[in-house]
Image (spheres, grey):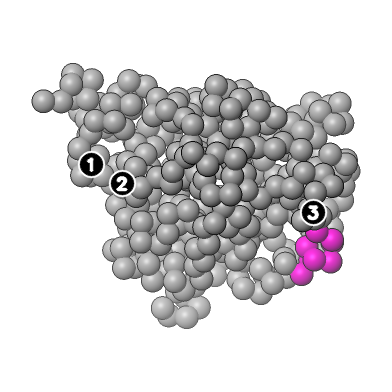
Amino acid sequence: MPSNILREALERAEAGKRLDADQALALLQEADFHHLAALADQSRFRRHHGGLVTYVVDRNINYTNICVCSCRFCAYYKAPGQEGGYLLSQEELDRKIEETINLGGSQILMQGGHHPDLPLSWYEAMLRGIKERHAIHVHAFSPPEVVHWAGMEGISTLEVLARLKEAGLDSMPGGGAEILVDEVRSRIAPNKCPADDWLRVMAEAHSLGMRTTATMMFGHLETPAQRIEHMLRIREVQDRTGGFTAFIPWTFQPANTALPGCRPLTAPEYLRTLAVSRLVLDNVDNIQVSWVTMGPKVAQLALSYGANDFGSTMIEENVVKAAGVGYRLEEKTIRRLVRQAGFTPRRRLMDYSPAPEDYAEETGS
């Protein structure tokens, strides 16, 4: 027999009502797997009844891997002076952007390490150069980077964001969230900004008219209750600002990191968490699959567990690949996978409006 809390959680989810922390945790830990999938799929259908599954054509560009954070979960960074550290030249950045545009890309996603020697003016010049030479949406940086620059410059994070926006920043991805619980952050990323700072920077970005995404990296040292706490903190900010376009839960990849005792999560564990995120985040329109960490077949299943977005073609991806996971999908493959799962693929922009030219219209596929 289900517990009283689970019974109440199932009833509220069925009715599309808001869940509290205890109810969400009961669903995550106790709900029947297939019943949970049906509830999440029903929640997705309430928002996206046309059967569309969106995706974006873009490229992840890591402009530097030099970082002073030393996060235990990261297999990509290099400490200052360490062999293998790099900083992309403007010429290399231009080449990557032009290649992206030629492949039909509408945006670039740029993130880097907490470089100790680059002033905020360097990033402003990079943004201005991109906008002068390329017609592309710049979806870049993360709250921890913004906090890092504010500390270096002795100014507020709001001023950092305003300067970046003026220089050409269009929107911001949800990187650096990991788990928004300081007990966890202090163990996996002790030199990265606290959870309150991450949430504040996102709210400040929203106040300036920038849209952002939110992420959750799970499957390391967090508890199920802390996953729920993370979702609820995202929901609270969204209640106030409405600025998050999507939520992207993805699984930690332990290989080549300083957390070798962790194991990769199974597909059912990933799908259960994703389904609960759809039910908890009743004010976030879009839930994105993580084919980069879970692979294309599990990503197809995720479309029946509450997700409605297939993410990015990721013409380039480096961080997850450094942890030993290397899935690659071309646009035509994403479209085929979406159709095989019973949905209609649709190319989009960052704000989830349709891309100006849809792939199907161009090719008849």
Residue placed furthest toward the bottom: 363
Identify residue for label 3.
83
Alpha-carbon distance for marks 3 and 1?
46 Å
Q: In this view, does 260 lie above or below 228?
A: below
Q: In this view, does 3 lie above or below 96?
A: above
Which one is closest to the eye, mark 1 or mark 2? 2
Q: Is residue 258 above or below residue 237?
A: below
- Residue bounds of the magenta highlight: 88-95
Specify the amino acid type for callout 1: Phe
Instruction: Assign a secondary structure to mark 2.
Output: helix
Would residue 342 be seen by someone viewing this image from the given angle?
Answer: yes
Label at residue 268: 2
Which one is closest to the eye, mark 3 or mark 2? 3
Specify the amino acid type for callout 3: Glu
Task: Give the main secondary structure, helix, strand or loop, of the magenta stretch.
Answer: helix
Residue placed furthest toward the front: 261
Identify residue for label 1.
33
Specify the amino acid type for callout 2: Pro
Residue at the spot 52% in from the left edge and 32% down from the top edge: 179
